[in-house]
Image (spheres, rainbow, N blue to C red):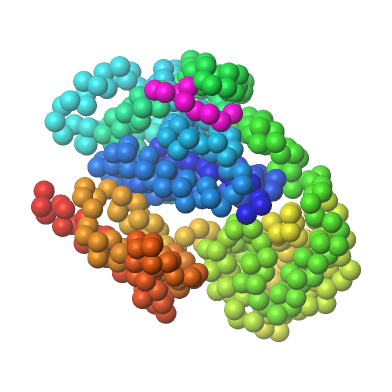
Amino acid sequence: MAEPGVFLIHGLGGTQYDLGSMHKRLKNAGFVTHALTLPGHGTRPEDLSGVKMEAWLEAARAKYREIVGQHEVLHVMGMCMGALLALEVAKLERHAKGRLVALAPPVYIDGWATPWYRGLRPLLYRIPGLPERMKVAEEEPYGIKNEQLRAIVKAKFERGENFHYGWVPLACIREVDRLRAAAMRGLDQIACPTLVVHAREDELTSLRSAHFLVERIGSGKRAGQARMVVLEDSYHMVCVDNDREIVGKHVLEFFNANAAGGFGMNRVDPEMAPAEMAELLASARRALERGDFAGLYRLGIPDFAWLQPGRNRGSGAFLGSKGLRRLRKWTDEGASFSAFGAAVINAGMAVQPATLLHRGLASPGVLAVQMRKGKLLEARWFPDDLDAEDSHFGGEPLPDGPCEQEKAFEAAAALSRTLRKAPDNATLLAMYALYKQGSQGDAAGERPGIMDMVGRAKHDAWTARRGMSREQAMTDYVALVNRLKDGESQEA
């Protein structure tokens, strides 16, 4: 696709929360963002005990190989442990289609709030059973200097919200140490321009980490290709702390994007003439008049978002294909738009009056649509009477994020990467087909040629599930992975 992409990798025990609003900032600036949930993450801390650093690295490399061919330009960015993985991905995959950003990379664990026993870690690793049983807890200040945000994070931990693990097993720290050692070797082989962002007051690592990376990467074939930004008012979680706007500004500038575009402002798109914007807007309007929200999403980038305000079952932020599935839980009841007024189009933004229709409701308001390079970025609905919509739809906002079944599905996908030995070919094909059916639905595209025997077998296995509901495929996939994992446990 013409839009540049960014592959973002989260940190140890974390989620996309580690990267704050970077996904949205990048999307607003015209990038397509890609992410993954690393093996052992997104479920329970106990699930990290048996995960090796090779599983994290292979998952990151597999995701990179999946998306690198989708973009003419692809950047890689990681936070904390994700920064180490980003370095290794760039090194091992010989990344040259874009740039590399390492945010708060923990090359050295020597900050002021690191545990007193950090130097004894190699000895503790040798005590049988201890690394799996010993818990390393996440404690204040949680890598955050901003006191208000720190209080919010503390409350989330106390409520048990699954945005970040409250502890990790010592065995997991051992694997991070192994990853760190691998990342520190051969840095001069990284061939892409690199930006290292580090907080001077980082409680986990000192500036020595950043200086080390800049010096070693900069000594490679392209001297001077690595540079550093030092933040003065943050701790370790640089994407959410006091300097988050500075981080966003430097990252966007490093990616050769207009920093103001990260806020959806002042973006001029020389590749999209006014007539093209008017035509795209007309296509979006026709889809909304038909109540065809799936058609609307097809006009957008992969993570196109529909934003519906209010406090009711129809409100929320509906991002990408998963967001569309959530959105259709109420739009398929007959929602559509009519009475479109004259649109005002400027700098990639179109604003026009409209009326939302739904089972006797006629709610006037304003529709705002952002566009770039022939695609919709997002659409926001602003009703004149928000209370009327809340009263009409009723209920509570739909859950923001995956449902319980989708969480179990992704957890099973992560668990599958921890299998000690590969299943037989028939089982591998079944896993592949169920995963594709559960994540994407019915198979699409042409059957691979006879010379591509592996691709042909995978396509046939997926096609054989045609018509199976996503829900059933997810259920069957989870059951299959758990059965394989249980079988390994019994053998052990």
Q: Quadrant of the N terminus?
A: bottom right
Note whether 289 is above or below 169 in the view shown.
Answer: below
Note whether 398 is above or below 167 in the view shown.
Answer: below
Left/right of residue 308 with respect to residue 218 in the rendered view: right
Please say whether residue 188 is one of the residues in the magenta stretch.
Answer: yes
Location of residue 384 in the rendering, given as x and y in whole percent from the top left corner: 79, 67
Q: Main secondary structure of the magenta part?
A: loop
The residue furthest front is 451
Q: Quadrant of residue 390?
A: bottom right
Question: Where are the magenta residues, as a range?
Answer: 185-193
Location of residue 473 in the rendering, given as x and y in whole percent from the top left corner: 36, 70
Query: Which residue corresponds to the image point at 16% horizontal and 34% vertical from the top-left?
Result: 129
User: Can I make out residue 173 in this image?
Assistant: no
Query: Which residue corresponds to the image point at 47% horizontal and 45% vertical from the top-left?
Result: 64
Please say whether residue 196 is one of the residues in the magenta stretch.
Answer: no
Left/right of residue 329 with respect to residue 368 in the rendered view: left
Query: Which residue corresponds to the image point at 32% horizontal and 37% vertical from the top-left?
Result: 53
Query: Which residue corresponds to the image point at 55% horizontal and 36% vertical from the top-left?
Result: 96
